[in-house]
Amino acid sequence: MRTSAFLERELSQRQVVLFFLLATLLYVLPLLLADFPYIDDNWRTLAAGNAWAGQGRLFADWFYQALTFTGAAPNIFPLPLLLAVVAMSLALTRLTFHYFAEPTLACCLVPLPLWYNPFLLQNLSYQYDGPIMALSMVAVIYTITFEGASRVQRWLVPALLLALAIGLYQISLNVFVGLCCVELLRAVHRPTRWPEILQMLGGKFAQLGLGILIYSVTAYPFMDTLRKTELLTLDGQPLLQIGINLERVLEKVALLFHGGYPWVFAVLVLCALTGCVRLGQSRRQPLWQTLLACLITLPMLILLVPGITLLFRDFNEGARTLMGFGVLLVGLFYLAHFALASGHGRLPLLLIIPLLATLSLSFAYGRVLTLQKDFASSALYSLSHDIAEHRELREAKRIYLAVSYSDRWLVSAAGSFKRLPVLHYLLNVDYFVLAENLPSAGITNVVAERERRNATRVGYQGFPALVDSLYYRIYLIGDYGFIVMKEPPHGRMLQW
């Protein structure tokens, strides 16, 4: 009886905060345990570098300068991520009370997909950038939920928060517009008259315009000129390019739906569609008006999965750009909660099933990161050992490392990649070793080749290799060395 009462009773604000603290921390626990420096983390750790201002993310520089009491960004992981977990817990608590006046445990599940977004795992993999991206979402949530006493506060404070969010990570714009779509569903549910709904949406997008204006006079001027010219142009067939980019995003998202995931998602969508119908039946206004709102909102949420990235000339299909997928899940959860609650008070607790599926994916991904860390350590040892063993290489003026990409480096995770193909997409690490890793082993004369790419990979192949390893060859010509990667061998998996 006590358990049953707890599942259905109203929770206090303190209880909701504790729930989100536990849930958000549990989701990033595998990343904390793996402690794997992810791609950019390597050079940032080596140089204590920030350099976010040139990307239009000035406030990210300020965040690390304030947190480390320096003018740079020494590695202080996991402190930033833990702070982001606390901030996100408070933000999700605020969003829960924004959606539900008397929240129960099931109500807390509705906004949780913002954090339990499977593609967000790649964002959170960055020990430097991950917390910044999370704090960007926190600022967006406070933008949506802020209710000021005066009209000036209701306009200015959300605009400042939104400018802060964009200055931390521009992709959070997708989250803001997506949450505005959920606000439309919420207004229809309350119910609210359509003139008031349109006024509310107009106010949100006015805040968006003011926030972009504030961003344009604060962080945007620090952006590199090259990044300012990356948008699609009218003379480059933008509609065709957007269509191609959408197709690429669909292919990547489809990697998630293997095993039981398609069934879980199909049931969630079915419940959400039922919620649309229930939403219309609960109102005095015609059913078609409510269904029209749902038909506008759901495709918009789908489009916002890639969102503003579709407008860039050099389209980035990385999982870290798909923050909008979390908002799509929130919209589906909101409608599904309404449908399930109309059947029985405990039925909305079934929403925990897709969340558990995502949590399971997080732990599987954490194990893959651990395997990658072990492989990277062994690769670093092998390469540094071969260099240290040869005096000519140790004393070389410079050794150029040709970065060669392959999807077969991490053999130890082949089984996980086969069963959960999205793991390989999330990992996004398909190189043997980075030049930035070598200084940790005492090797300081290795640099990544750039302008010498063709010469390194082709021009010196005719010379005898000083070192011929399983994965690479090292050439020495005069005072310069060249590391050329081999294609990983097709090893046969052992059958047990």
Image: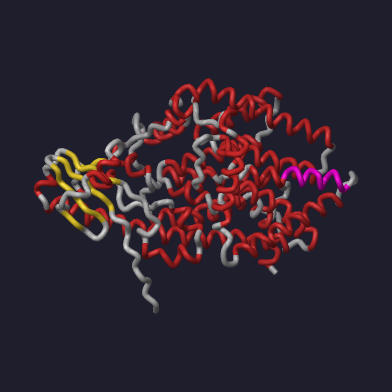
Residue 236 % position (x, y) = 56, 32
Would residue 439 be found to the left or right of residue 107 on screen? left
Q: How many marks?
A: 0
| Residue farthest to the left, as pictured | 391
Q: Is residue 164 magenta?
A: no
Instruction: Tell me if I can see residue 172 in this picture.
Output: no
Instruction: Identify which residue, 297 or 79, lies in the foreground.
Output: 297
Q: Is residue 56 above or below residue 193?
A: above
Residue 264 % position (x, y) = 64, 63
Residue range (magenta): 287-297
Q: Quadrant of the C terminus?
A: bottom left
Q: Residue at x 69, y 42 (%)?
A: 300
Residue 330 % position (x, y) = 65, 49
Residue 129 % position (x, y) = 44, 41
Q: Quadrant of the N terminus?
A: bottom right
| Residue farthest to the front, as pictured | 462
Q: Is residue 91 above or below residue 254?
A: above
Instruction: Identify which residue, 4 or 228, lies in the foreground.
Output: 228
Report the magenta stretch's main SS.
helix
Query: Can you tell which quarter of the image residue 141 is in?
Result: top right
Q: Residue at x 56, y 58 (%)?
A: 256
